[in-house]
């Protein structure tokens, strides 16, 4: 079997067998994460996988068995991920959530983890429906989108990507579970990005929300899918030998030395301009199109640890010596209360 | 203008070092620091005191009281009745004057004439034209308002014989670094002192004399001690949502971290504090950090406890250590947010849906707040489960005299059963929830420890010994039984009850936390009436066996609860199988600390059918 730079095979990145429905978009996300991590030669045990509750939140079981996982409480993955990240800044954090988990019950926590700039990759496996409870509409279902039972969404949807951009996420992308070619480099870039990286992955629910009238089904997504630019991810170790055409390429170097190459398509999209990004996503939406790819990136924001100026060593590695001020200091404190 | 309104017929209280002074103020008027200065001055004179804030949930304009009990014998509970009132609030002055015991004193601002209906013929009035004095002496409007408070403290120093040097020393301490403020404050104290001395016979018969009772002791509030205990206990992560009366726990943690937890070389912080968007996130952050090997806590009160229930169940079932400080206030719902109660016992003991049980610690004074805060982190790590420290507003936000805080430099944090990479190497197959030691406590690993071993999937769903999801009922039941066993093991790490020296009486008294402040007084007063009781102050839940034994060895035990529903009594009944007839409830739930008088009266009333020689009531 083929090994990567750290001598691991693809199998070393796999998880347990999926229990999701055959053809579920979520399984493609697991597969993409496995591929992305293996290709980047991530050490599996240096990743922590955290999720909430729902079909989406089962995903962490299906990749990186050698990583610790935490399937927490419905809608509360962001807080658990925040605490975990604060405790040890040296690990990679992958949060996996769904549209019910992040756009409904957990919308508040989602907003605040974005604001707090936790250094992590946050994936929403977005199918517009509640699978485990058999097909109710979720808050990301587009106005007019119909479920299998014929229920039509009467409300405007919550767009997680524009929301993330507005709240200050420094890396926002959208992709489709069916488009491995686009999703894998985005996952890699999100993992390498220092700061809060968010990927909204449209991931059809084959059982409850894959009708012709569902905007989160395979048919609609393929038909209305607009890639803003093709994305290549170049890990740091690889010598960049290809020469890119400056007119048609945009290179973004990430903090860890790796790079994203954006192959420009017809439009002249600039993912570093927040206002234009928002405008563009909304303009596509108006035409019934789904803007995908790297939507926004800002590499100059500090993460929570930098903002709080925490020590270089992980907080969970500090012991008595570093943490306990001792009896002498306590005697002095006692004296101020006399 | 300032003659003493006191008919020669009115008796006056003659008491030395044993009385209650109450300050009635308008909140936001700057009275808190002046009143605190008064209390601290008495403390520095060596006389035991217990100050109690009775304050509104408001920023400015509503009534607030500061009640200081002074007691040479060290009775630190509240006492009913007021001996001297400083009546500074026109909204409440009628009630305030009415609260004074016959022969007591009313200090008021005589810049305005006191209405006739406020004149009682059985109390003594101490009129001081506070407003007029300040108008004359100070120029800025803010000073004129604030210094009224300092002037009455100055007057009290003459009336009650407070050592003036102690007061000036306090001013110097309080304004260290802001020297410009020292002189005007001392001037204001002198104005009050002079006015009282010039116009009244000072000191009053109600007065203070220096004592040595406070030797070595400190005067501190429980939340300061809790915040400091968390620093000493090695907490590195605090996540919280502001909520009275718990807010000052994290404020103090932050204050002492800034002083004691900065890396000397880099100036960087060895801690992180996150003000969360709500209590759900606060405990979620603490649990995430605890899972990842940092000592983490949150502090909250009743409404926050309600919101944290689901997460507490997760931490219990997935076995993640977390420390939670519950500074209890009056519920249900918003209740009385600035009043005190022991009303969260049941909802914390069994927090969350399904079968759960949580360790509770019941501190009774600031020293125990410090000790339990520090040890809560050890206990949580050992048992890999939440530990809830059950303080209350009374203890958290009021200063109390206690022994100085103490730390043993030889002590080391006990992180519990955590496997490192080398230990994992020696294990063939790691099972996160395997009970290898038979004590119900399995071995944890932190994320990132070993490339191939020790990873597992933490979940709130049913799992087997290897953390794999299961819907097998017998495996689920095994896990639940092990968790029950773990709680039995946990008892070994918890503080034993404190028993009275004698345990040979037929009657007993059982209680927790702040109720303790009234107990010595209760025992002394009842003894004078020929009633003797043994006492048991319970300090932790689940209960030690000695708790049950105490009930077994007494014919009747009075169980004191500062809540309506006798929650401590219920817990004892559920957990220790104690027969209803063995327990007699004493309840107090008006939002202020239970008094010795109330407890005494309840006990005596329960004996109405028998003489007071200790016969058990029918």
Image (spheres, rainbow, N blue to C red):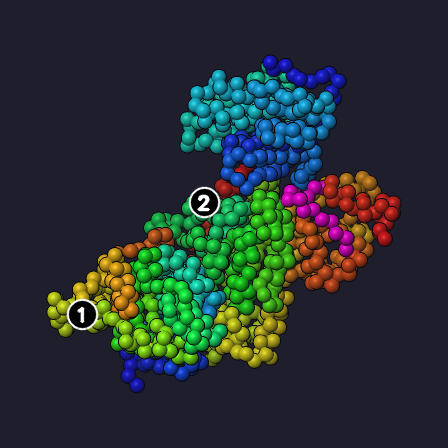
* In the rendered image, the vertical position of residue B23 relative to residue A75, given as above or below: above
Q: Quadrant of residue B530?
A: top right
Say which of A330 and B548 sits in front.
B548
Q: Is any part of residue A194 visible from this angle?
A: no
Q: Assign a secondary structure to mark 1.
A: loop
Tell me if mark 1 has few (under 14), some (14-19) or many (20+) residues whose alpha carbon lies within 10 angstroms of its own. some
- In this picture, residue A300 sits left or right of residue B182: left
**Quadrant showing the N terminus of chain A:** bottom left
The disc numbered 2 marks a residue on which chain?
B
* In the rendered image, the vertical position of residue B343 relative to residue B600, given as above or below: below
Say which of A99 and A303 sits in front.
A99
Q: Quadrant of residue B77?
A: top right
Q: Position of residue B140 (x, y in %)?
A: 43, 23
Q: Position of residue B369 (x, y in %)?
A: 57, 49
Q: Position of residue A32 (x, y in %)?
A: 32, 76
- Residue under the image location 48 percent in, 46 percent down: B252
Say which of A234 and A272 sits in front.
A272
Callout 2 touching callout 1 (CB < 8 Å): no
* In the rendered image, the vertical position of residue A100 relative to residue B596, given as above or below: below
- In this picture, residue B400 sits left or right of residue A233: right
Q: Which residue is mark 2?
A: B255
Numbered tag placed on residue A265 in the rendering: 1
* Residue range corresponding to the magenta coloring: B583-596
Q: Position of residue B437 (x, y in %)?
A: 57, 73
**Quadrant showing the C terminus of chain A:** top right
- Residue under the image location 59 percent in, 45 percent down: B336
The CA span between labels 2 and 1 is 54 Å
Q: Are marks 2 and 1 on the same chain?
A: no
* In the rendered image, the vertical position of residue B361 relative to residue B180, given as above or below: below
Marks counted in the figure total 2
Q: Is any part of residue A300 visible from this angle?
A: yes
């Amino acid at each position: 079997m083929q090994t990567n730079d750290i001598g691991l095979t693809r199998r070393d990145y796999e998880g347990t067998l999926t229990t999701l429905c055959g053809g579920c978009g979520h399984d493609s996300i697991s597969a993409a994460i496995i591929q992305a991590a293996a290709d980047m030669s991530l050490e599996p045990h240096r990743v922590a996988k955290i999720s909430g509750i729902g079909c989406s939140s089962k995903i962490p079981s299906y990749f990186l068995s050698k990583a610790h996982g935490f399937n927490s409480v419905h809608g509360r993955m962001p807080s658990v991920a925040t605490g975990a990240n604060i405790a040890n800044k040296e690990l990679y954090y992958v949060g996996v959530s769904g549209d019910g988990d992040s756009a409904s019950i957990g919308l508040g926590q989602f907003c605040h983890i974005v604001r707090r700039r936790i250094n992590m990759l946050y994936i929403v496996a977005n199918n517009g429906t509640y699978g485990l409870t058999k097909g109710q509409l979720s808050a990301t279902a587009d106005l007019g989108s119909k479920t299998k039972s014929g229920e039509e969404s009467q409300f405007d949807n919550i767009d997680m990507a524009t929301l993330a951009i507005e709240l200050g996420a420094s890396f926002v992308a959208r992709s489709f579970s069916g488009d491995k070619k686009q999703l894998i480099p985005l996952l890699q870039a999100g993992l390498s990005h220092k700061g809060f990286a968010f990927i909204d992955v449209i991931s059809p629910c084959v059982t409850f929300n894959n009708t012709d009238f569902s905007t989160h089904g395979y048919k609609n997504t393929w038909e209305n899918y607009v890639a803003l630019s093709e994305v290549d991810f170049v890990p740091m170790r690889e010598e960049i030998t290809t020469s890119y055409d400056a007119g048609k390429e945009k290179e973004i170097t990430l903090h860890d030395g790796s790079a994203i190459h954006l192959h420009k398509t017809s439009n002249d999209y600039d993912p570093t301009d927040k206002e234009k990004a928002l405008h563009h996503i909304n303009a596509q939406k108006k035409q019934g199109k789904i803007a995908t790819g790297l939507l926004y990136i800002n590499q100059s924001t500090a993460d929570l640890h930098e903002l709080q100026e925490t020590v270089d060593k992980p907080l969970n590695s500090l012991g008595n010596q570093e943490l306990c001020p001792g009896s002498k200091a306590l005697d002095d404190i006692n004296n101020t209360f006399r | 203008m300032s003659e003493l309104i006191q008919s020669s017929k009115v008796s006056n209280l003659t008491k030395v070092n044993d009385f209650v002074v109450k300050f009635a103020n308008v909140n936001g008027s700057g009275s808190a620091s002046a009143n605190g200065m008064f209390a601290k001055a008495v403390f520095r004179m060596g006389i035991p005191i217990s100050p109690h804030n009775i304050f509104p949930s408001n920023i400015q304009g509503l009534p607030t009281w500061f009640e200081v009990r002074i007691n040479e014998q060290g009775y630190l509970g509240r006492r009913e009745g007021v001996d001297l009132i400083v009546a500074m609030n026109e909204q409440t002055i009628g009630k305030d004057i009415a609260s004074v015991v016959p022969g007591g004193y009313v200090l008021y601002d005589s810049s305005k004439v006191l209405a006739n209906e406020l004149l009682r013929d059985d109390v003594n009035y101490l009129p001081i034209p506070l407003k007029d004095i300040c108008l004359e002496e100070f120029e800025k409007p803010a000073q004129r308002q604030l210094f009224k408070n300092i002037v009455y403290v100055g007057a009290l120093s003459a009336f009650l014989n407070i050592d003036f040097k102690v007061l000036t020393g306090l001013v110097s301490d309080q304004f260290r670094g802001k020297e410009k403020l020292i002189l005007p404050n001392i001037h204001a104290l002198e104005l009050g002192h002079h006015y009282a001395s010039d116009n009244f016979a000072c000191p009053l018969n109600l007065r203070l004399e220096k004592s040595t009772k406070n030797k070595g002791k400190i005067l501190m509030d429980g939340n300061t001690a809790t915040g400091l205990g968390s620093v000493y206990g090695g907490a590195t992560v605090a996540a919280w949502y502001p909520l009275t009366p718990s807010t000052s726990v994290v404020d103090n943690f932050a204050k002492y971290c800034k002083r004691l937890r900065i890396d000397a070389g880099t100036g960087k912080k060895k801690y992180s504090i996150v003000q969360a968007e709500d209590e759900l996130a606060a405990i979620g952050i603490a649990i995430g950090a605890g899972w990842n090997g940092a000592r983490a806590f949150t502090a909250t009160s009743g409404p926050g406890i309600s919101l944290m229930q689901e997460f507490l169940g997760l931490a219990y079932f997935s076995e993640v250590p977390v420390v939670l400080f519950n500074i209890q206030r009056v519920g249900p719902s918003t209740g009385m947010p600035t009043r005190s109660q022991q009303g969260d016992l049941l909802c914390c003991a069994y927090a969350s849906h399904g079968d759960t049980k949580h360790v509770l610690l019941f501190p009774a004074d600031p020293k125990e707040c410090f000790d339990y805060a520090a040890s809560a982190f050890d206990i949580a790590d050992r048992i890999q489960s939440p530990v809830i420290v059950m303080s209350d507003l009374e203890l958290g936000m009021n200063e109390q005299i206690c022994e100085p805080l103490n730390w043993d430099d030889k002590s080391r944090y006990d992180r519990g059963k955590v496997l490192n990479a080398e230990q994992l190497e020696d294990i063939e197959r790691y099972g996160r929830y395997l009970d290898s030691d038979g004590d119900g406590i399995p071995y944890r690993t932190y994320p990132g420890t070993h490339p191939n071993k020790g990873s597992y999937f933490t979940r709130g769903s049913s799992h087997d010994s290897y953390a794999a999801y299961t819907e097998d009922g017998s495996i689920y039941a095994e896990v639940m039984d092990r968790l029950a066993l773990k709680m039995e093991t946990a008892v070994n790490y918890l503080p034993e009850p404190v028993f009275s020296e004698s345990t040979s009486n037929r009657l007993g008294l059982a209680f927790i936390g702040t109720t303790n402040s009234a107990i010595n007084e209760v025992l002394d007063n009842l003894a004078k009436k020929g009633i003797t009781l043994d006492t048991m102050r319970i300090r932790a839940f689940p209960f030690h066996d000695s708790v049950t034994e105490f009930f077994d060895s007494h014919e009747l035990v009075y169980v004191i609860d500062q809540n309506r529903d006798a929650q401590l009594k219920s817990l004892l009944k559920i957990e220790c199988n104690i027969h209803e007839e063995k327990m007699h409830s004493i309840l107090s739930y008006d939002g202020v600390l239970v008094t010795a008088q109330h407890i005494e009266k309840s006990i005596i009333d329960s004996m109405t059918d028998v003489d007071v020689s200790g016969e058990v009531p029918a």
